[in-house]
Structures are given as C-alpha cells and as structure tokens.
C-alpha cells in the first residue's frame, strides 16, 4: 500500500465494511443514549416521559456505583497482572524443549475452551466450596479452618477464576512471540556476558513488549464486561463486594426493570472503557508504533 | 593474548559425528580462516570454540588454560554473527555498550571506548540510531564495534560478509584486515569464499566433512596443496584436474595445472590443444573455457586481456611444466 492509487483503491474497497460497522455501532449507541434520558420503567408501562439528567444523577448517587467502578478496575487490573506475569512464565517454560511438549501445550490451552459459566461453576462447587471443595478438604485434613472463598475473599476468588480462564490466551500469544525471537541474539548476549536474568530483561522482555501490549488491550476489552462468572458464583455479593459496572447495569435494567437507569449505566460503561483505553494507549501505545 | 588450542575435539549431534577428532593450534595474534564447502562443520567448530556448543569429547585451551567447560562469557572471546545479531530495540550506542554494561565497566570508560570504536568504524553519526535504520554494512560495523569494546582475547567471525553485496564485501574485507593489523588480536574467521580466505588469512584451515584437509599460509596452500580437494578448492578460477593417459604421461594418477600456468599459442607447436567454448573477458584477463583437449571436459585458461579467440577456434595450450601438481591414487600429493 504505497502508491496513491492503491491507497485510494483500498479506501474504496473497505468503505462498505466501515459504513456497515459504523451503523452497527451507532444505532445501539444512539438508542442507549436516548433511553438514558427517558423515565422508562417496565413496571410502569405506557408513558416514557423525558427525564433529563435524572437517570444519571440517580445512577451516580447510588452507593453501589462507587463500589462497582472500583470493583471493575480491581478486576481488570488484577487479572491483567496475573495473566501477563503468569503468561510470560508459562511461555518461558513451554519454550524449552522437554518431554511431552505437545500434550502439555494442549493442556495449558484447554481452559480457554471451557465456557465461562461452566468453569465458574466448576470452581465454585469443586474447588472453592468450603465443605465439598478440594481446597476445603485439604484445609480440613490439615486441621485448618477451611476458607469460605466467596464469603471471605469474593473479589479475589473471581479474579482468580477469570485469570485461570484467560491465562491460556496470554500464554499462547506470548509463546509465539517468544519463539519468533532470533536465537542468535540470545547467543550474542550470552557471549556478551549477560546472565539469564539479564538476557530476559534486556533481550526477551523488549522483544515481548508488543505481544504484551496486544494481550493487555484485547483482554481489557473483554474483562471490562465480565459478567457470567459473577452471575453464577456470587450474584454480585456479598453486598456489592463483587458488583462490577456490567453487573450493576444488569441489576438496574433487568432486576429493577429500569431501562432508563440501565441505559445511563451503559453510557457510563462506554465512558469508562474509553478512559481506560486512552490511558492504556498512552502508557503502552508507543510499543505499537516502534 | 589469545592462543587457542584444540586437542582431540569431537562433536556429535545425536548419532551424527560432525567433527571427528581434531587437533589445531591458533597462535596469538594470528588471522586464521576456516574455509570449506557448505555443511563441512566450520560454524560448528567456531561455536565450539565460542562455547555456544558443548564438545562431545576433547579439550579446548585458551592461553594454556582449559576452557572446555567454561561458559561463553568467561572465555574472553567476542563473536560477530552472520545475521549481525544486533539488539533491535537498543540504539547503536547501547548495542555497543551492552557487553561493557554486563561487565560493569565504569560509565566514563564505557563512553571512551564507544567513542573510540565509533571513530575507528565510522559510526559516530549513527550512534543514536536503531539497527533497523542502518544499512547492511553499517550494521556489520556495529556488530564489530560491539566486539571490539570488550577487548577480547580473540575475535570469532562467522561468515560476517555473506549478507553484503560484492562491492561492500571487498570494502569490509579490507576494513577487517586493517583492524587486525591495528589490534594484532587473534581472529578466527569462517567463510566458504576462498577469495576471502586467500586475501585475509595468515593461516588457512581447509575443512571437509569436519576433517582438516590442510593447514598453512595462503601461498603454501596455493603452491603445494596436499591433496586434490585442497587443490580444487583454493585458487580462482579452480585448478584444472585431470586423470587418464595424459596424467600418466606426467607420472601421476591425477594431475593438475592452474589456469594461470597455461599459455595459449599456435596449436601446431604447443603441448596440448583444444576448442574454445566460452571466453570471459574481464578486461585485464580473459578466461577461456576450452573443450576437446583430451584431458577433462573443460580446461580453464587464464590469458592476458588482449588475447582474442572466438567460440569454436582451435587453440594451443602450453602448461608450465614446473607448475604441474601431481597426485597419487588416493589423491595425495606426490612430492
Ligand atoms: N543443531 C544441530 N543438530 C544436528 N545437526 C547439526 C546441528 N547443527 C549443525 N548440524 C550439522 O552439522 C554439519 C555442519 O554444520 P555447520 O553449520 O557447522 O556447517 P558450515 O560449515 O558452517 O556450513 P555453512 O557454510 O553452510 O554455514 C551439517 O551437516 C549440519 O547439518
Ligand atoms: Mg555456517
């Protein structure tokens, strides 16, 4: 795509797709914004009078709102840290030649194929349950008090479950990036007297920077809207301990039947996603154009 | 100091023995070239010396000390790779500084050495660029700069010029030779280009399938190749080797004569004769490829540039009898 002709041809070719995508995006967006200004409750059908900024006011002043924002950020941040650090670790392990690499790789990737609801239920019942769960059993057999995960550390438990599901994705992307590293660079660094940790820090990590950026960006998009895992495990509780923005919107629009309020929450979610995106781009975007 | 000794060194990859037992001494300050056809084990041998591969058996000594089990960094050797192996995300300055940073050389000493190396290699203007913004020749110089600043006991080069175009290659060849004269450090240089070997080396090691075929100065190898392999490998264009009655007449199983040791003349009065096939005019010289000589399929002759024969002409050939190489049944030189 270097000549003028090929550039304008390219623009022409992709314009139908762009127009379609824009409509796809704009129609729901406009409707959400519109609904957010109406007093629109399914319990009182009929009139949907103009409500101005009321929905926004009530959504923000709802005590759950603050919690939801912080929970959302903690959820995204915690999972990103665990998956990126863990993903690099797994990638380094899987990159070395060892016995049964093929099977181990498939096993590492497997969690990604399990549906969110299923894996959350498996973790809830088989692992985290204080009476029947494996962790509970281990604690009991050691004579310790079993932890009731969803009651005592609910947010951490959910971070853990979602991290478990996203770790394979991070590992996979980071592993392919690691494998594309020129071996001669590592050998040159070895000759230059770099220890393993120096080689990791000065050669491998910079090489992985772009892949890490991609992992963070893609995961952030999906993690801002974590929902199924919360619904099947804690229902946002205890209290609002695990209510994130997505779950709060669900509560207002589908449990309280307040479409207007839910829409206002949706607009907030869009704004939050954009703030996070700009922040991320600023922080790591320079890796992408290098 | 950089005297490198290999004692009965072998290397196998699984079942395959790539280097059979091999002895070699490289004197301090010597420019040694490993040359041989592709896949003969040159890189493997160099990597054994560097410590990037483990020896299967045998010992490697550097300045008399056993370095067989030392990690690469502890051997005090610097290596320049064929792909340059520069660190792409670091500036040229940081690339050159990297080995010193690893060795915890003080900052101002680092800067002094970088300036010095950059000046010697004409890199001063490029110090703040990334490797991706440099040409092939400049990248090669950065790789050499990174090696120089370590002040190693010996430099190892693995086909450093093979990614460069012909003109640049000649230039870099001179630069490396000059560098060697100036630093007087041991250098081991791997190439499959016998011209590079002849022009740069103090000592050439000719390898075939992991075996050393001959070790000697370029002129020794040119004048007295020990066997037909070396005879055919060293020299450009290649030596004409032939068997059969004509060779037997000269008292050899295989006889060889270099293109530059055959004179052309009137077919009526010369020792051999043939038909001109292709004539390659280089200006200063002309290479004639001659057929139907009764010696071998093609005999190459190097004649002065102004000698003019056309395709299909009969041509007479007069070898310089004192320059004919004779080899026995096993291909070994007959003294
Ligand atoms: N890691 C390895 N595993 C198995 N065999 C190898 C390995 N590295 C090299 N070899 C084999 O060892 C032999 C020598 O390889 P080497 O790279 O030393 O050749 P070379 O002389 O450097 O050739 P070239 O001029 O093409 O670079 C080859 O036959 C190659 O197939
Ligand atoms: Mg090689």
Image (tube, coloured by chain):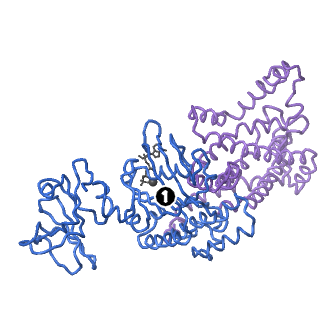
Q: Position of residue B208 (x, y in %)?
A: 37, 50
Residue at 84% x, 18% y is A141
| Residue wearing tag 1 | B158
Horizontally, residue B107 falls left or right of residue A109, namely: right
Is A208 situated above or below A103? Answer: below
Is A9 situated above or below A194? Answer: below
Q: Within the image, what quadrant is residue A138 found in? A: top right
Residue B82 visible, this orientation: no
Q: Quarter of the picture for ligand 2? A: bottom left
Horizontally, residue B208 falls left or right of residue A9, namely: left
Residue B226 visible, this orientation: yes
Horizontally, residue B57 falls left or right of residue A252, namely: left
Most distant residue in the left direction: B268
Q: Within the image, what quadrant is residue B34 found in? A: bottom left
Residue at 39% x, 56% y is B215
Is A228 situated above or below B42? Answer: above
Most distant residue in the bottom direction: B306
Q: Nearer the viewer, residue A274 or B45?
A: B45
Horizontally, residue A210 falls left or right of residue A223, namely: left
Q: Tell me, what hue is chain B?
A: blue
Q: Is mark 1 within 8 Å of ligand 2?
A: yes
Q: Position of residue B46 (x, y in %)?
A: 50, 53
Q: Position of residue B75 (x, y in %)?
A: 61, 53
Which quadrant does the C terminus of chain A fall into?
A: bottom right
Q: Which chain is purple?
A: A
- Label 1 residue SS: strand
Residue at 70% x, 62% y is A286
Q: Nearer the viewer, residue B262 or B324?
A: B324
């Amino acid at each position: 795509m270097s000549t003028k002709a090929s550039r304008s041809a390219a623009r022409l070719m992709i314009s139908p797709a762009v127009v379609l995508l824009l409509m796809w995006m704009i129609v729901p967006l406009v409707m959400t914004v519109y609904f957010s200004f109406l007093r629109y409750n399914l319990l009182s059908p009929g009139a949907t009078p103009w409500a101005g900024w009321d929905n926004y006011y009530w959504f923000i002043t709802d005590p759950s709102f603050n919690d939801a924002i912080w929970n959302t950020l903690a959820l995204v941040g915690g999972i990103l840290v665990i998956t990126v650090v863990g993903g690099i670790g797994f990638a380094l392990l899987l990159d070395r030649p060892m016995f049964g690499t093929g099977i181990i790789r498939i096993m590492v990737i497997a969690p990604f194929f399990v549906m969110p609801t299923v894996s959350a239920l498996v973790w809830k019942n088989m692992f985290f349950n204080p009476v029947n769960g494996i962790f509970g059993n281990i604690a009991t057999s050691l004579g310790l008090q079993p932890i009731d995960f969803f009651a005592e550390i609910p947010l951490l438990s959910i971070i853990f479950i979602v991290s478990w599901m996203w770790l394979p994705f991070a590992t996979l992307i980071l592993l392919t990036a690691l494998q594309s590293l020129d071996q001669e660079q590592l050998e040159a660094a070895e000759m230059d007297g770099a220890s393993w940790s120096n080689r990791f820090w000065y050669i491998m990590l910079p090489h992985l920077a772009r892949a890490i950026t991609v992992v963070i960006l893609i995961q952030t998009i999906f993690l801002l809207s974590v929902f199924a895992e919360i619904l099947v495990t804690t229902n946002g509780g205890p209290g609002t301990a695990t209510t994130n923005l997505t779950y709060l919107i669900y509560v207002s629009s589908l449990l309280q039947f307040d479409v207007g309020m839910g829409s206002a929450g949706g607009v907030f979610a869009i704004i939050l996603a954009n703030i996070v995106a700009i922040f991320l781009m600023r922080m790591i975007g320079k890796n992408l154009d290098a | 100091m950089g005297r490198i000794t290999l004692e009965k060194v072998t290397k196998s990859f699984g079942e395959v023995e790539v280097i059979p037992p091999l002895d070699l001494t490289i004197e301090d300050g010597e420019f040694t070239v490993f040359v041989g056809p592709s896949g003969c084990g040159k890189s493997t041998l160099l990597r054994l010396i560097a410590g990037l591969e483990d020896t299967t058996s045998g010992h490697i000594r550097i300045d008399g000390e056993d370095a067989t089990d030392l990690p690469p960094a502890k051997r005090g050797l610097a290596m320049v790779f064929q792909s340059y192996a520069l660190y792409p995300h670091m500036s040229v300055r940081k690339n050159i500084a990297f080995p010193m940073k690893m060795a915890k050389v003080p900052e101002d000493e680092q800067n002094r050495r970088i300036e010095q190396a950059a000046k010697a290699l004409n890199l001063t203007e490029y110090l703040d660029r990334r490797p991706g913004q440099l040409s092939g020749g400049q990248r090669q110089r950065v790789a050499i700069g990174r090696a120089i600043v370590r002040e190693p006991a010996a430099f190892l080069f693995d086909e450093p010029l093979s990614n460069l175009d012909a003109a640049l290659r000649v230039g870099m060849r001179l630069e490396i030779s000059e560098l060697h004269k100036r630093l007087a450090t041991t250098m081991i240089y791997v190439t499959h280009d016998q011209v590079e070997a002849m022009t740069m080396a103090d000592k050439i090691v000719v390898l075939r399938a992991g075996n050393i075929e001959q070790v000697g100065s370029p002129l020794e190898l040119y004048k007295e190749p020990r066997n037909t392999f070396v005879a055919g490998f060293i020299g450009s264009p290649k030596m004409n080797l032939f068997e059969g009655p004509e060779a037997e007449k000269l008292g050899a199983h295989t006889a060889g004569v270099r293109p530059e040791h055959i004179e052309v003349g009137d077919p009526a009065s010369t020792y051999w004769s043939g038909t001109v096939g292709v004539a390659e005019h280089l200006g200063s010289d002309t290479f004639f490829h001659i057929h139907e000589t009764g010696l071998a399929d093609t005999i190459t002759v190097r004649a002065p540039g102004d000698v003019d024969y056309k395709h299909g002409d009969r041509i007479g050939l007069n070898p310089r009898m004192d320059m004919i190489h004779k080899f026995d049944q096993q291909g070994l030189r007959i003294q």
